[in-house]
Image: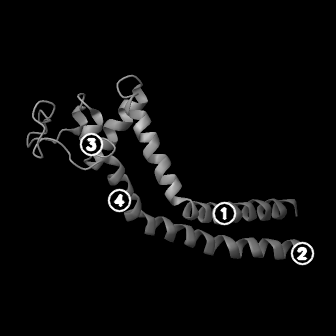
């Protein structure tokens, strides 16, 4: 009996957290997006000074083919190599000296991240719904088992 009660409480808590998190995430999506943009601008100053920030920016810009928050001008005069497009020989083109659309990623990372989130939101929503469809009946069955024991 204590195992059934423990299972019921954990699964009930998981259903509540998943449901509340989904509703709050949807309700505050604009505020979350603005917070993301503010944090991105704040982290620009830490580039080159904090290793984790530098690695994060470099990975984001290389993986999403973007540069800066809105565009490459966010970096002022110190455009990182991760903003430079790859040449055919897997080398970086020299984009610091020659800033053209042939050498530098033009899309900002904020736009690239939001596009990636929108592309994956259907998958995330579907996975949440599938999880709820499995967890709710399991929680109800655990509750039923508690009442008959």
Quadrant location of residue 14?
bottom right
Q: To which residue does mark 4 refer?
A: 115
Q: Position of residue 54 (x, y in %)?
A: 36, 30
Q: Position of residue 121 (x, y in %)?
A: 44, 65
Q: Residue furthest top?
A: 49
Is label 2 or label 3 in front? Answer: 3
Q: To which residue does mark 3 refer?
A: 67
**Label pair 1/2, CB-CB below 8 angstroms:** no
First-in-chain label (4 vs 2): 4
Q: To which residue does mark 1 refer?
A: 20
Quadrant where the C terminus sits is: bottom right
Secondary structure state at the residue bearing disc 3: loop
**Local crowd size for mark 4, using a 10 Å CA cut-off: few (<14), some (14–19), many (≥20):** few
Q: Position of residue 89 (x, y in %)?
A: 8, 39
First-in-chain label (2 vs 3): 3
Q: Position of residue 16 (x, y in %)?
A: 71, 64
Is label 1 or label 2 in front? Answer: 1
Q: To which residue does mark 2 refer?
A: 147
């Amino acid at each position: 009996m204590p195992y059934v009660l423990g299972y019921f409480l954990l699964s009930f808590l998981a259903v509540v957290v998943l449901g509340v998190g989904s509703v709050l995430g949807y309700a505050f999506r604009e505020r979350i997006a603005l917070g993301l943009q503010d944090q991105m601008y704040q982290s620009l100053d830490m580039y080159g000074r904090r290793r984790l920030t530098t690695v994060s920016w470099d990975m984001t810009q290389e993986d999403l083919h973007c540069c800066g928050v809105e565009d490459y001008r966010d970096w002022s005069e110190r455009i990182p190599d991760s903003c430079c497009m790859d040449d055919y020989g897997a080398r970086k083109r020299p984009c610091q000296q020659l800033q053209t659309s042939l050498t530098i990623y033009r899309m900002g990372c904020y736009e690239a991240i939001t596009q990636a989130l929108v592309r994956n939101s259907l998958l995330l929503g579907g996975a949440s719904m599938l999880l709820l469809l499995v967890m709710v009946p399991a929680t109800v069955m655990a509750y039923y088992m508690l009442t008959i024991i």
